[in-house]
Image (cartoon, rainbow, N blue to C red):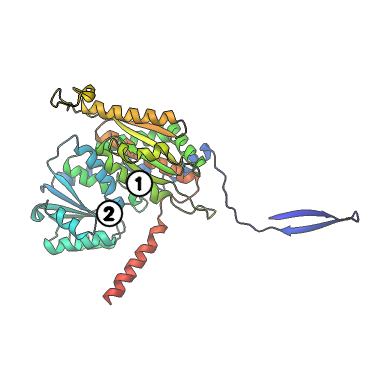
Amino acid sequence: MNILVVYSSNLNKSIIKEVFMKYKKSFYQIKSNETIFDSLKEEIDVIGYYNLPLQDTSKYKEFAKNVKQKDIAVIGIGGSTLGTFAIYQFLLRRKEYDKKLHFFESTDPTDIKLRLQKIDLNNTMFIVISKSGNTIETISIFKYFSSLVNMSSKNCVIISENDSKLTTFAKKHNMKTFEIPKNVGGRFSVFSAVGLLPLAIIGVDIDNMLLGAAKIRNNFFSQGSFYDAIMEKARFMVENKNRFNINVVFSYSTSLEGFNKWYIQLWGESLGKFNINGTRQGLTPLGLIGPVDQHSFLQLIAEGKRDKTITFIKVEDFEDDTTIPLNTMDGFDDLTYVDGLKFAKLIDEQANATIESVSNLKDIPYDVITINRVDEYNIAKLMFTFQLLTSVVGKFVQINTYDQPGVEAGKIILKNKLSYAKD
């Protein structure tokens, strides 16, 4: 940057000197909503997750109807399983399925053995998921299972990139494969084969699920009401990120515990980056479950440091009439006001009371999302909303939302350590 600086001397003479100032920007300008939106529209054909809700699902349903096994073992980790588990856990509280999903993610040997006890290895369909095809946890567990049971086209299907080592292995052994597009990141892949195939196999209405995601997608890109809500929320978070750096999702249903875990990966791995100016960005995600965490974390929210925003998530209709009975215990006269109350009503009022108490403090930013009912359509709407919100925030802070360079160093160190130990 060239700057002309004028120095005046006591001799009334002026000296003009050219100075070259070198600096590295440690700031950036928060762009307008219109600029951010235009940038997102340019990504539609580049970032693959945007168009997943519009895909044809016939190949998944065709494969699913021929699966006879009752136990479905999903082998994967992170983005390969968290989204599927979130949807499955959410729906499982409301509906029973003839088939069961079992998730093998951890290399904890006791966890592997415990989960193995719940399936019949000789009557299980194995779904092995790894975008890169070389994920150490996934391949290690797959290798172990292959030593216990003969893996073949009859009991094993592979989901990976079309040119990965895992796909090559599958084709060599005549196993069915489904592709994860290269432009769909793992944590954005739940509406690809990663989630659609295992959910279709157990009987989830994946078409209705994609309709929910498409509702949000189309409304956002046509700048409807969801566009306004997502943009407003993202802008607030970015403009206040130095003050409110922790973003809490407070879900009032244990069926959303899997969603909380999925959100934590999506938010943390997507937004914790260096931006284009080399400055560190990131908003720390936390997932809470109500009313349980009213008895743990709420105290910190209420009287602790003001560095948190809260998104409360409620379920409007649990479709469950379980009721607190009348007069079954003596000595609790001070709690008779709950007698005859439905548990669904109780948890809803617990959420409302917590929301009101936070509102009364007047210095904690919060919003409320209400899920109409427990079904595929509504959980997909929720998840696609958070995917779009993540993309918008990433655009505002000027990072690459879709990579994860910060986790690669640990993978390299692990590989070197294990290779050295083997040698």
**Number of numbered discs:** 2
Front residue of this view, candidates 76 and 173:
76
- Residue 105 against residue 299 in the figure, above or below: below
Residue 396 position within the rendered picture, expressed as x and y whole percent measured from the top left? 50, 44
Question: Which amino acid, by three-letter code, is at mark 1?
Answer: Ile
- The quadrant holding residue 221 is top left
- Select label 2 or label 1 by which is in front: 1
- Residue 105 against residue 222 in the figure, above or below: below
- The quadrant holding residue 364 is top left
- Residue 292 against residue 403 in the figure, above or below: above
Query: How crowded is the residue under tag 2: few (<14 C-alpha within 10 Å), some, or many (20+)?
Result: many
Query: How crowded is the residue under tag 1: few (<14 C-alpha within 10 Å), some, or many (20+)?
Result: some
Q: In the rendered view of the protein, which quadrant contains the C terminus? A: bottom left
Which residue is found at the position 76% from the left and 58% from the top?
18
Q: Earlier in the sequence, mark 2 or mark 1?
A: 2
Which residue is found at the position 45% from the left and 32% from the top?
228
Q: Is residue 222 visible?
A: no
Q: Secondary structure at mark 1?
A: helix
Q: Secondary structure at mark 2?
A: loop
Residue 111 position within the rendered picture, expressed as x and y whole percent measured from the top left? 19, 56
| Res. 264 mark | 1
| Res. 77 mark | 2
Question: Which amino acid, by three-letter code, is at mark 2?
Answer: Ile
Residue 272 position within the rendered picture, expressed as x and y whole percent measured from the top left? 43, 51
Residue 366 position within the rendered picture, expressed as x and y whole percent measured from the top left? 42, 34
